[in-house]
Amino acid sequence: MDDVDVDVLDFDASSNAELDWNFIDDDAHGGSVCQLNTMPGLDSSSGHSSETPDSHKPYHTKRPHKKSRAGCQQCKKRKVKCDEVRPTCKACRLRKEKCVYPTTATSSALVIISKSSATSAPTSTVIPETTTSSSSSPSSSSSPQPYHEPNTSNLIIAEPLFRPYEMRDALDMKLLWFYTTTAYRFFSIQSGRSAIVDHVLQVEVVKHAFQSPFLMNCLMAESSLHLQNLNQPIPSRRAADYLSKAFKGYRDAIEAANPHDYPALIATSLLMVAVSSQMFRDPDGKPLYVIDWMQVWRGIGLIVDIVSPRVLQETGMAVLFYRPPVDLEKATSYIPNHLLFMVASIKPGDADEKHQQTYYDMLKYLGSLYQEMREHGFNPILDLRIITFFTFIPKGFIPLAKEHRPRALVILAHHLCFAKLTPDVWWMRGIADREIRQICEEVGDEWSHLLRVPHMVLKTSDRTEIAQLLTNNRNWTPTEMDQYEKDRNPRLKTDLGLFDNDGEEISIYQGQWKRKSSKKPRSHKITDLGELLGPFPGVSSTATNAISNSS
């Protein structure tokens, strides 16, 4: 077809303005049909209207056709319909003319994909936006501008930033879309309030997910579990598959410790907290799973130790780990008396004698929750303290909880009472009631007098009533902020930062941690991988089976 010479009638501008050209591509008949219609009421010879008997005939509309909005310059100049085939349209190919497409301000990027390379990765041709400067005189804006050939040197050939080859089908795309629009908001109280935090969660995390498959599987698992929590029809087998791959990939990435995966490891350590909470919603889940969940929380700090503070700073993900400071000395005065007496009554020869200081330290962190609620009522900082409570726990407390020491379980039960005050975080729902009941059954009647408050909290879901039970004051009503006050709470800017477990503010200086109150940098300790990988062998198999067996 390209080698056939076709004579095409040419019309001058005055006559061509009165005609309507339609190119109809009829591939079924092996050619093109050029149809010339004369506008009704116009005489083709003179170009003026004439009253003839034929002019009173009923007007028949043309058959519907798609208009060309982005045709080439030659077709627009000749006022014919362009089929918009690139790089050369059919009309220009038949006339053996140079086919040039215009650059417009409304079309800033046009993608060219050849039929021969339909299966290969698309290459996009980015055409920069062109802006015309307006003249100071009114007449210059309405006067016709001379036509200029586009400057082809401004064309930029660019590959996509990343190719979504991991996306298998529409469900994968749906889950990724759900994360970037909704699910990301549940991993920072600053999401929706800070453009920096939103960019990290919506853009940077997803970018690293396309480079590290284990993070992508974690995103898919989180979105699928979240949608199932919203009663959306997500296939259980797919959710279990995402979950299993996320756990295995996370474990393998920790053991490999590839610097290329360090940013993805940081993001996965945070998302894994939500993903691993699925066991709480499994009726046949592991008893006292909250103890294993504590290790997942502690894994965040251990991952940071592996990747070094420099990576945390360079990736911009440090903002995801901002916490409020803890005044341990002041928090001591807010610890409930019966819990203080429980630790103070440890006598010589008691099995917990050498762990007494660990219990005291744990009570101080618990006292910070009571302090925040009494001084400021319900607010986003209280929610953050409750959610991140397990990131502060002393390392020596986890073995005591694993041994089901009664004092350790009693302290955990009181923290779980606070967990019922955060119903807006989907992965915190359904945790408290189940674990409190299991703790009460585990410790027995001997310690039941210390679990009076958790017992009563099981009977209510009202936040104010729970707060009154925790403070042992039925007449006290905590202050509560509306959404406007929450979004503009000045403490979200002044009270959040990087703090160590002693409540000291720290910063990253020359790739190392540095206390702001001291010039001596903190040491970068070597992480115990056995401690970090501890909860995952059991979690991966049981959680996968739980989702597979659920409806």
Image: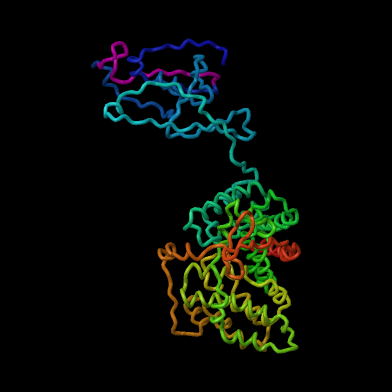
Q: Is residue 267 above or below residue 477?
A: above
The quadrant in which the C terminus is found is bottom right
Q: Which residues are magenta?
A: 29-49
The quadrant in which the N terminus is found is top right
- 86 or 159, nearer to the observer: 159
Q: Looking at this view, name the residue that lies furthest to the front.
A: 519
- 156 or 119, nearer to the observer: 156
Q: Residue at x 66, y 89 (%)?
A: 345
Residue 392: x and y in percent read 62, 70
82 falls in the magenta region: no
- Whether residue 290 is visible here, answered yes or no, is yes
- 225 or 514, nearer to the observer: 514
Q: Residue at x 66, y 55 (%)?
A: 265
42 falls in the magenta region: yes
* Quarter of the view holding residue 303: bottom right
* Quarter of the view holding residue 240: bottom right
Residue 148: x and y in percent read 42, 21
Residue 255: x and y in percent read 75, 56
Q: Is residue 152 above or below residue 261?
A: above
- 339 or 161, nearer to the observer: 339
- Whether residue 415 is visible here, answered yes or no, is no
Q: Residue at x 23, y 16 (%)?
A: 51
Residue 299: x and y in percent read 67, 63
Q: Is residue 15 above or below residue 189?
A: above
Q: Residue at x 38, y 26 (%)?
A: 62
Q: Looking at this view, name the residue that lies furthest to the left.
A: 51
**Is 205 displayed left or right of 41 in the figure?**
right
Q: Is residue 429 above or below residue 6?
A: below
